Image (cartoon, rainbow, N blue to C red):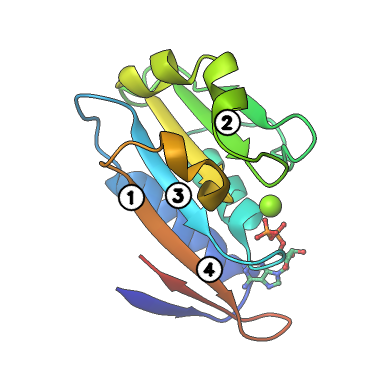
């Protein structure tokens, strides 16, 4: 599907609608967020994480590679959202060192990855893709 997003508020609503549709599976749920710098991947993640009742401020994990948000109990079956920015990586080896194999096995994890193409060699087959495109200062297109 393809959607025109006219402003920040629409991006927030889009992220929340995707979050609300996310169901627990047999393994971790993985969203690969494709798109250039400034296309809205981190902004989408902020909205997505807020939908799970996390009050913490979501900031880009560019320099730390990975940030883990503990989800409040009782709101659903998921326990953690793991936000990864693979921009600085060349292949998935560093992710393996960060415990990737265990992270993707746990169905209670949701993993959101910016620049997934950088770690294409470790992505499992069953991933969900969202593609972000810059239109102008306030507008974006999302394909999902
Ligand atoms: N409709 C929109 N959706 C997402 N971001 C928008 C939108 N309009 C303006 N922006 C701005 O564009 C920038 C997007 O940056 P960011 O989400 O960090 O992109 P990325 O993580 O893809 O590099 C932010 O400064 C945000 O405020
Ligand atoms: Mg980003």
Give the spatial CA distance, label 3 vs label 1.
6 Å
Q: On the rendered structure, is 87 left or right of 121?
A: right
**Label 2, on which residue?**
54
Mark 1 surroundings within 10 Å by alpha-carbon count, few (fewer than 14), some (14 through 19), many (20 or more): few
| Residue extending furthest toward the bottom | 136
**Label 1, on which residue?**
128
Q: On the rendered structure, is 129 left or right of 24?
A: right
Distance from mark 4 CB to nearest ligand 1 atom below 8 Å: yes
**Label 3, on which residue?**
32
Quarter residue 94 falls in: top right
Identify the secondary structure beneath mark 1: strand
Image quarter where the N terminus lies is bottom left
Marks 2,1: beta carbons within 8 A: no
Give the spatial CA distance, label 3 vs label 2.
21 Å
| Residue 123, percent from left and from top | 40, 38
Of the numbered discs 3 and 4, the one sitting upstream in the chain is: 3
Give the spatial CA distance, label 2 vs label 1.
22 Å
At 62% from the left and 85% from the top, the residue drawn is: 135
Q: Can residue 58 be seen at all in this image of the molecule? A: yes
| Residue 8, percent from left and from top | 64, 68
Of marks 3 and 2, the one in the foreground:
3
Quarter residue 59 falls in: top right
| Residue 98, percent from left and from top | 59, 17
Of the numbered discs 3 and 2, the one sitting upstream in the chain is: 3
Of the numbered discs 3 and 1, the one sitting upstream in the chain is: 3
Mark 3 surroundings within 10 Å by alpha-carbon count, few (fewer than 14), some (14 through 19), many (20 or more): many
**Label 4, on which residue?**
132
Mark 2 surroundings within 10 Å by alpha-carbon count, few (fewer than 14), some (14 through 19), many (20 or more): some
Marks 3,1: beta carbons within 8 A: yes
């Amino acid at each position: 599907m393809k959607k025109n997003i006219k402003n920040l508020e629409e991006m927030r609503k889009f992220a929340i609608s995707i979050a609300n549709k996310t169901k627990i599976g047999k393994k971790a749920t993985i969203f690969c967020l494709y798109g250039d710098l400034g296309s809205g991947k981190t902004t989408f993640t902020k909205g997505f994480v807020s939908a799970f009742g996390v009050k913490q401020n979501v900031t880009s994990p560019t320099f730390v590679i990975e940030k883990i948000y503990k989800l409040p109990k009782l709101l659903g079956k998921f326990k953690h959202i793991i936000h990864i920015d693979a921009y600085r990586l060349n292949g998935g080896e560093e992710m393996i060192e960060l415990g990737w194999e265990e992270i993707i096995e746990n169905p209670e994890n949701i993993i959101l990855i910016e620049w997934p193409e950088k770690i294409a060699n470790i992505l499992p087959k069953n991933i969900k893709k969202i593609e972000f495109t810059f239109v102008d200062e306030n507008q974006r297109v999302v394909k999902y």
